[in-house]
Amino acid sequence: MLAIFKREMRSYFTSPVGYMFCAIFFAVSGFLFMLNTVQAGENANYAGYFSIILFLFIVIIPLLTMKLVSEETKMKTDQLLMTAPITLADIVFGKYLAALTMFGGSFIVSSAIYYIPLAMYGTPNLALYIGCVLGVFLVGSAFISIGIFISSLTENQFISAFGTIGAIIFLLFVSSLNSYINNEAVRNFLSGLSITSRYSYFSYGLFSYDSLIYFISLSAVFLFLTIRVFEKRRWSKS
């Protein structure tokens, strides 16, 4: 797994993808943070900044995941991976951890930097801030697992990217469908599936075990499905 992790991390910085991700994330997140804190004056709302970041994922998460597996399939290097002396789980987790490191490293570093002016010129609620950071990180980790799964289904990077964008948009806005549905059971199901409703606990500075388990389970399910895709492909090649 470590070899796959190093290989994917290296690939991010031997191609424009890693630089594009960092540039877009730091530029947009810095601008959004300034609008919600410095420019807002007495109405500064850093919790609102973190909520907006969730919608930034629609653009930046596909950048990280669109080529992770689809490029391997297109270049036929997936066959080399599947015959290498490593497990399929090692392949999938290595790729997942590389994308998570890129996202998590950028996000946590930026969050630490943005907290400094808040602490210097005000008295921010540390528990609320940490809750927002943890919540956004968990959402991002779940979206990355979904992106890797979709990338494993196609050899076209653009289809992978658009598929991931569609899945993220659906999970972010699924709870808004409740206003058009009268069936109580369906409404409860959509509310339980909603990413934003689960994240809202963290955005209020509350630690929710249910939400934590939800995000971890969501990530685990899509990583498991990705392993099954690799397994099916291995047997079809044999």
Image: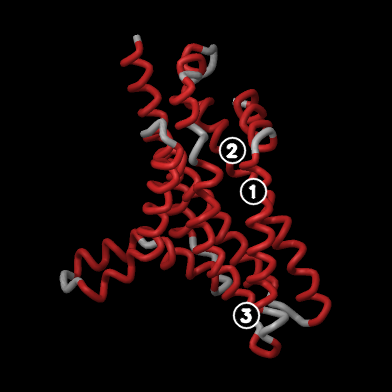
Marked residue nearer the N-terminal end (3 or 1): 1
Inspect the image, locate mark 2, and give the three-letter code of the amino acid beneath it.
Leu
Q: Residue furthest bottom?
A: 42
Please give the label number shown on residue 195: none
Q: CA distance from mark 3 to mark 2?
A: 31 Å
- Do labels 3 and 1 touch, CB within 8 Å? no
List the residue tagged with mark 1: 20
**Residue at left 33%, top 22%?**
232
Q: Is residue 95 above or below residue 237?
A: below
- Residue 35 is drawn in which quadrant? bottom right
**Mark 3 against mark 1, which lies toward the viewer?**
1
- Tell me if residue 2 comes above or below residue 86 in the rendering: below
Q: Amino acid at mark 3?
A: Asn
Q: Is residue 112 left or right of residue 78?
A: right
Q: Nearer the viewer, residue 196 or 77?
A: 77
Q: Amino acid at mark 1?
A: Met
Spatial CA distance of label 3 from label 1 is 28 Å
Q: Secondary structure at mark 1?
A: helix
Task: Give residue 56's position: percent from left, percent from top.
Answer: 53, 61
User: Can you say which quadrant of the picture contains the C terminus?
Assistant: top left
Q: Residue furthest right?
A: 120
Which element is circle 2 on? helix
The residue tagged 3 is 45
Left or right position of 98 against 152: right
Sequence-wise first label, 3 or 2: 3
**Residue drawn at (50%, 46%) of the image:** 144
Residue where numbered disc 2 is placed:
97
